[in-house]
Image (tube, coloured by chain):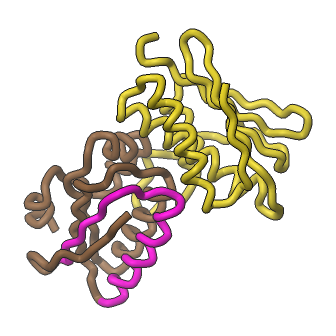
Chain colours: A brown, B yellow
């Protein structure tokens, strides 16, 4: 899994997540995002178009990050996820608690 | 039938998962279904590493076999007896603030596999995943 900053847009930190978010890699995602939030980034747009796989460990990390941002009056929007990843969000009901949009542009408009 | 046995360590996850996905690939499952099989397997393996062997070391054995219409993935450990299928489903409708972190793994296994069974035999937990073959 790779998670990288790709700039800022509409006062939001733009990030890209690719590869596999599983029990092995999810803790790295959480640690990296926690650091960026502590640096003062409270509005985050995550481009997930390169994310191939997510398990409950990945969902759990995203939930932790979304809760932390909510406390700081911030938010994270997830964009561009492929069908198999979207399915996992849907089964888990995460599509109802974390904003998910089709494109990064739509996410920037909503953040 | 094919079998792989490794210490129940997070660093062995990749080898265990690759063993299952290679088997699924050789049976002609779609890329999408292979990811679902990997996901169910990962959730079962993580449960063993985090709970069955919480306070001790142990091994995980995966046995892949089949019947005329299923790929059958048997995941075994010698940890404390625990039927993960006895867990109730998490509330998937609660709000962001109320949503609990956890409890989703078993729920995903149930939703994605065609059938799942648990048994306790000779000091082993045996979780068996049944996946209907692509042309069955």
Residue located at (55% from left, 45% from top): B17
Residue B75 is drawn in which quadrant?
top right
State the residue in front, A55 or B84: A55
Given the current orientation, which residue lies at the most extreme right position? Answer: B122
Query: Would you say residue B116 is visible in this rendering?
Result: no
- Asked whether residue A45 is drawn in magenta, I would say no
The answer to which of A78 and B29 lies nearer the viewer is B29
- Residue B4 appears left or right of A57: right
* Residue A94: % across, % down: 38, 51
Q: Bounds of the magenta span?
A: A12-39
Give the answer, above or below, for where A63 lies relative to B36: below
Please provide percent x and percent y for residue A32.
39, 78
**Which quarter of the rendering shows the C terminus of chain A?**
bottom left
Query: In percent of the image, x 35 and y 57: which residue is there?
Result: A19
Image x and y of residue A74, in percent: 28, 76
The residue at the point 45 percent across, 77 percent down is A31
């Amino acid at each position: 899994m790779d998670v990288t900053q790709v700039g800022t847009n509409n006062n939001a930190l733009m990030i890209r997540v690719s590869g596999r978010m599983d029990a092995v890699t999810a803790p790295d995602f959480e640690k990296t995002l926690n650091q960026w939030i502590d640096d003062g980034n409270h509005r985050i747009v995550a481009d997930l178009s390169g994310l191939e796989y997510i398990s409950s460990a990945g969902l759990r990390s995203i939930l932790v990050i979304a809760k932390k941002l909510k406390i700081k009056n911030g938010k994270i929007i997830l964009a561009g996820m492929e069908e198999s990843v979207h399915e996992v969000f849907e089964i888990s009901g995460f599509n109802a608690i974390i904003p998910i949009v089709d494109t990064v542009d739509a996410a920037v408009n909503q953040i | 039938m094919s079998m792989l046995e490794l210490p129940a360590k997070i660093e062995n996850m990749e080898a265990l998962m690759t063993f299952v996905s290679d088997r699924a690939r050789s049976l002609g499952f779609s890329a999408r279904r292979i990811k679902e099989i990997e996901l169910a397997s990962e959730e079962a393996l993580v449960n063993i590493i985090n709970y069955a062997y919480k306070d001790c070391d142990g091994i995980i054995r995966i046995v892949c076999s089949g019947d005329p219409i299923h790929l059958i993935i048997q995941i075994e450990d010698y940890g404390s007896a625990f039927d993960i299928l006895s867990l109730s489903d998490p509330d998937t409708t609660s709000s962001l603030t109320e949503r609990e972190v956890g409890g989703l793994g078993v729920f995903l296994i149930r939703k994605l596999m065609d059938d799942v069974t648990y048994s306790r035999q000779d000091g082993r937990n045996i979780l068996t995943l049944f996946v209907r073959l692509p042309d069955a």
